[in-house]
């Protein structure tokens, strides 16, 4: 491709609204262009990267035994109501009406459609296992589209669905997909980490995410070097430790004038925050829920929601707390009636906590569970922290950041039961098909590649997904033989099957080199009067500082070797 003809100009200025490195660099490199918030056009260079990622994914899905299909974007809303997931997706589901006033949704994912397809075509255990996938556009009305391609409203996604006779079959399909995913990230040249994840709105049981490790990643990962435990922050468990504070003593009321926060109360009574109980109030499906957790810990709302199974969960407002007759700043479950109480398991071990007295400026010492208060649910609802004990061994959790580039779920049978996707076993007995689903966001993967691979000058594409492999950069003034040599090289390299971006513009070396660095093409060939004196061209890798002269007649072979690896 000749740069003089290429659609998309490089920009020197950082776009004002670009809040991540990948967003800035992809826009500056002329690879993507925003239409409205969270909706982007791919320009020729960006689209070539996406297509390369797509090809790698397709090859790995086929290799794992997947069959490619293409399912409709337009889906009847009734399907979403039938599965109940219209509520789980809420406003993220794009909906519209056709001319007959029939409500439709733009597919944010395709479990409903594919389960209906399986119900129609799978009848016998002989039809299973089955792996179906597609690579297609999806729509989610994200509340806060951001980060360029990181969080968008229209996006390309590979989604595969597995259908098996039983849990053991699902485990096998799941294992196959985990391997396919590892292959994909490795082939894209992107170091990744598999972590335990929450299954969120999709539903289901086991769930794993694949993270591309990047400093700028929005997801925090907690992991253990000793036993390979890794989970995202939403899901991570940790050993909280028991707070030993002697034998249970009789409760004792103490005056705590003007002390409202845990820090104030703990400081006033001269105890560490871990010796106190904190009360937090939520509204779950319209009802007040009283949450109690050790004073040094914070509530993880995802875990809390999993324990409550609420369709809608939010923190209670101050007026709602007052309205409910709760004494904010001195609230505790001791002697409290009329609320659903959920406790983090941290409060059930340990003794002699300080808790609120449920009247102004009053706290109670020596509160012990279950002697002094009852709860409706005990669960792990705390946010794990770096430095906490690993749940898998005696090691300590560490923290890093990543970008989620893949998410896999064991769905089980809840959708096949809803859509009557049953099969007959050898004896003629009917069972629901056991399902799994496996997604990769292609644009997100592209952005993650940039987040992981860049410097202050621009992108450094991993070779397997680079838009072009070679940046051919002749430097000359009118009448120089350099132009002819470059034209011949351009033809020869392409004839050898290499992908070449030819900077045929009459620009200064500075501009050409800056653009080469910004675009991030892995191999740069510079032809100039100086290199031609030695009958050579200069070869430089984007990822390295040093360059080397390569004789003209060896260039094609040399580049071929580098690209083959
Ligand atoms: Zn461990």
Image (cartoon, rainbow, N blue to C red):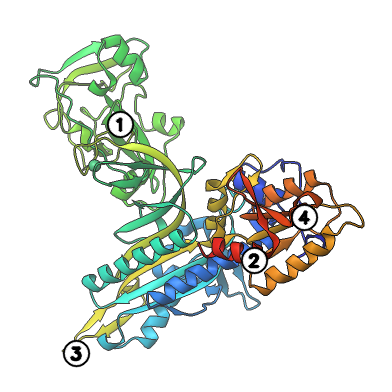
Q: Given this view, does label 2 or label 3 mark the residue nearer the observer?
A: 2
Quarter of the render that holds ligand 1: top left
Q: Residue at x 46, y 69 (%)?
A: 159
User: Tag 3 or tag 2, which sits nearer the N-term?
Assistant: 3
Q: Quadrant of the N terminus?
A: bottom right
Real-space CA distance between mark 4 and mark 3, rounded to the nearest whole angstrom: 78 Å
Badge 1 residue CB within 8 Å of ligand 1:
no
Q: Which residue is mark 2?
A: 556
- Asked whether the beta carbons under mark 4 and mark 3 sit within 8 Å of each other, the answer is no
Q: Residue furthest left?
A: 247
Rounded to the nearest whole Å, what is the CA distance between mark 1 and mark 4? Answer: 59 Å
Q: Position of residue 215 (x, y in %)?
A: 49, 40
**Residue topped by disc 3:** 428
Q: Nearer the viewer, residue 323 or 491?
A: 491
The residue to which callout 4 is attached is 532
Compare marks 2 and 1 and give the one earlier in the sequence. Answer: 1
């Amino acid at each position: 491709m000749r740069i003089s003809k290429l659609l998309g100009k490089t920009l020197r200025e950082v776009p004002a609204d670009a809040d991540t490195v990948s967003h800035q660099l992809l826009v500056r490199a002329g690879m993507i262009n925003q239409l409205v918030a969270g909706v982007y056009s791919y320009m020729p260079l960006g689209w070539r990267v996406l297509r390369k990622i797509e090809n790698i994914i397709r090859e790995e899905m086929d290799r794992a035994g997947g069959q490619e299909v293409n399912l409709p974007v337009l889906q009847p809303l009734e399907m979403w109501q039938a599965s109940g997931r219209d509520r789980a997706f809420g406003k993220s589901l794009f909906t519209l009406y056709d001319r007959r006033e029939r409500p439709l949704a733009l597919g944010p994912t395709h479990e409903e459609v594919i389960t209906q397809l399986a119900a129609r075509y799978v009848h016998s255990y002989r039809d299973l296992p089955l792996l179906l996938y597609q690579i297609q556009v999806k729509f989610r009305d994200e509340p806060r589209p951001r980060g360029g391609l990181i969080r968008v409203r229209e996006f390309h996604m590979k989604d595969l669905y597995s259908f098996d006779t039983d849990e053991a079959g699902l485990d096998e399909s799941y294992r196959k997909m985990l391997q396919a995913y590892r292959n994909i990230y490795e082939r894209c040249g992107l170091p990744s980490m598999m972590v335990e994840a929450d299954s969120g709105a999709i539903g289901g049981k086991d769930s794993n995410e694949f993270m591309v490790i990047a400093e700028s990643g929005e997801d925090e990962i907690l992991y253990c070097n000793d036993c390979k435990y890794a989970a995202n922050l939403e899901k991570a468990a940790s050993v909280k430790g028991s707070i030993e504070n002697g034998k249970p003593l009789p409760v004792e009321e103490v005056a705590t004038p003007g002390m409202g926060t845990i820090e104030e109360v703990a400081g006033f009574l001269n105890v560490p925050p871990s010796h106190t109980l904190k009360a937090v109030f939520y509204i779950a499906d319209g009802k007040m829920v009283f949450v109690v957790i050790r004073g040094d810990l914070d509530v993880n709302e995802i875990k809390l929601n999993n324990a409550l199974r609420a369709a809608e969960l939010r923190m209670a407002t101050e007026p709602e707390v007052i309205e409910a007759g709760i004494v904010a700043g001195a609230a505790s479950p001791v002697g409290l009636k009329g609320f659903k109480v959920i406790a983090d398991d941290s409060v059930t071990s340990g003794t002699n906590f300080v808790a609120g007295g449920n009247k102004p400026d009053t706290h109670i010492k020596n509160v012990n569970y279950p002697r002094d208060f009852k709860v409706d649910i005990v669960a792990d609802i705390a946010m794990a922290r770096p430095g906490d004990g690993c749940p898998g061994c005696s090691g300590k959790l560490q923290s890093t950041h990543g970008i989620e580039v893949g998410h896999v779920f064991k769905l089980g049978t809840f959708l096949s039961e809803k859509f009557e996707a049953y099969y007959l076993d050898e004896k003629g007995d009917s069972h629901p098909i056991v399902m799994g689903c496996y997604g990769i966001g292609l644009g997100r993967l592209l952005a993650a590649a940039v987040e992981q691979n860049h410097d202050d000058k621009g992108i450094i594409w991993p070779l397997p997904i680079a838009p072009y492999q070679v940046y051919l950069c002749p430097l000359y003034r009118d009448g120089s033989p350099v132009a002819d040599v470059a034209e011949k090289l351009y033809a020869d390299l392409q004839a050898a099957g290499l992908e070449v971006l030819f900077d045929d513009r009459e620009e200064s070396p500075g501009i050409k080199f800056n653009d080469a660095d910004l675009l991030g093409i892995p191999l740069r060939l510079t032809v100039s009067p100086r290199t031609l004196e030695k009958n050579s061209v200069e070869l430089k890798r984007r990822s390295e500082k040093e360059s080397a002269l390569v004789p003209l007649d060896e260039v094609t072979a040399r580049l071929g070797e580098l690209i083959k690896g």
